[in-house]
Image (cartoon, rainbow, N blue to C red):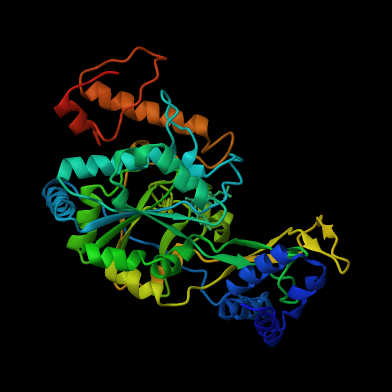
Amino acid sequence: MTFTEAKTLLETHGQGHVLAFWDTLDAARQEALLAQIATLDFAAIERMQTMLQEAGRPAAASSSFEPAPVEEPEGDALAAYVAKGEELLRNGKVAVLVVAGGQGSRLGYDGPKGAYPIGPVTDRSLFWFHARKILGLDLTYGTHVPFYVMTSDTNDAATRAHFEENGYFGLPREDVFFFVQGMWPALDPQGKIILDRPDHIFMSPDGHGGTLTALDRSGALDDMARRGIEQVFYFQVDNPMIAIADPSFVGLHAAKGSDMTLKVCKKRDGHESMGVVVIRDGQYAMVEYSELSDEQMERTNPDGSLWLAYGSPAIHMFSYAFLKAEAERHMPLHLAHKKIAYVDAEGKVIKPEKPNGYKFEKFIFDVIPNAKTLLTLAFDRTQEFSPVKNAEGNDSPATTRRDLQAKWRGWLAQAGVTVPEGLPVEIDPAYALDAAQLKAKGLLIG
Ligand code: UTP
């Protein structure tokens, strides 16, 4: 892109100020700024501006809804779903997708969150546990499960380096596909793009909903098609307890011809910050934690159980066809009022004390209302969910390690091994994906 092209493009969209400091920049900075301008998605920016103009109008969605029904298959039905899931895994029809483009600001770790050392004995990383589970699936089902890893500009190089340094954790390199999510500018209240330096537009990741566009643009969807993938398991990078593409989940979702299936678990209490899957105006939808009133969070059924008992920790199955169709649609935008460093008329960088601009994001769960068939499946959080979100307190490395220990000690007890109190344990998922596999294989203690 040349200066003249950039100027025309920006002025056409009322954003000519982006080049205000052009004459003060050296050639390298000018080039970097042009490269940034070339990535701007003006159609999306126009949607952001419209949203800013409309902010303050009442939300169209009705606030009355019912919790969505939850599947809890048992006995023969469960066995049939497991068999179906195993067949799909064996036939190479299942892919795994992790979203790891977030900034991990609450954890405050200097590196991609997926490289965070979580192994209680070995300090192995979150990515290590995920990749070794995929290797476990490969070995158990004699297959190659492809692993799609979404990063963002801020952590892509470091994430790839982490895989390289660790020999891809034993996975074949050709089965790991990295792709980078989009970045969006932020706007001031007048809809103008914010510069955080005279030579730089402030940009941040476009949210986990950006997965769909990024899957499409990067060629990941084409790669899935080439491999004959029919079902995609989606999860977030911060939960080392995750049961990746477990056959019952894959099987239920596929057997019922579902577009999207969400795993849901019992909330710790009504106020736990998890979204809930509901039926609103005859359609499935996710209601975010921040949208719930105290009354809705605390409401109970006649038997004393919570009305909104189940939360969604963003563990999903998608059919490939649904993902592909959704990648071609526009997703709704969500805006957040934030403090964003900006340059004043003289080019001085100002750090504001109050929110001064708007960041925009897309959320993956906004595809829910478009699903023709949607299911939710209950799971046991003591076995599958304990994320690393915060540096301390709930959902921190300490609670995740504690929960990993409790789970693995349980597996070892089922295999007839009692571990002395206080002795840390860790199980390589490539050796045993679950308690039954551990029991069947016996122990190799290292
Ligand atoms: P979170 O918002 O919980 O985690 O995102 P975060 O962004 O890593 O950390 P904070 O909020 O700054 O403390 C949940 C999941 O979605 C991914 C994250 O990597 C995480 O796996 N994510 C989030 C993306 O991939 N891209 C995004 O733009 C946002």
Closer to us: 226 or 79: 226
Picture quarter containing residue 261?
bottom left
Q: Residue at x 30, y 59 (%)?
A: 232
Closer to us: 363 or 124: 124
Q: Indicate the quadrant containing the C terminus: top left, top right, bottom left or bottom right.
A: top left
Q: Residue at x 16, y 27 (%)?
A: 441
Q: In this figure, what is the number of numbered marks? A: 0
Horizontal side, residue 288 vs residue 42: left or right: left
Picture quarter containing residue 241?
top left
**Picture layout, residue 386 above or below residue 409:** below
Horizontal side, residue 3 vs residue 271: left or right: right
**Picture layout, residue 221 above or below residue 85:** below
**Picture layout, residue 63 above or below residue 138:** below
> Residue 439 location in percent, x, y?
18, 26
> Residue 338 location in percent, x, y?
70, 60
> Residue 329 location in percent, x, y?
43, 77
Picture quarter containing residue 424?
top left
Q: Residue at x 32, y 46 (%)?
A: 379
Closer to us: 390 or 134: 134
Horizontal side, residue 24 vs residue 387: left or right: right
Horizontal side, residue 163 vs residue 205: left or right: left
Q: Indicate the quadrant containing the N terminus: top left, top right, bottom left or bottom right.
A: bottom right
Is residue 56 visible in the rendered image? The answer is yes
Is residue 381 visible in the rendered image? The answer is no
Closer to us: 214 or 52: 214
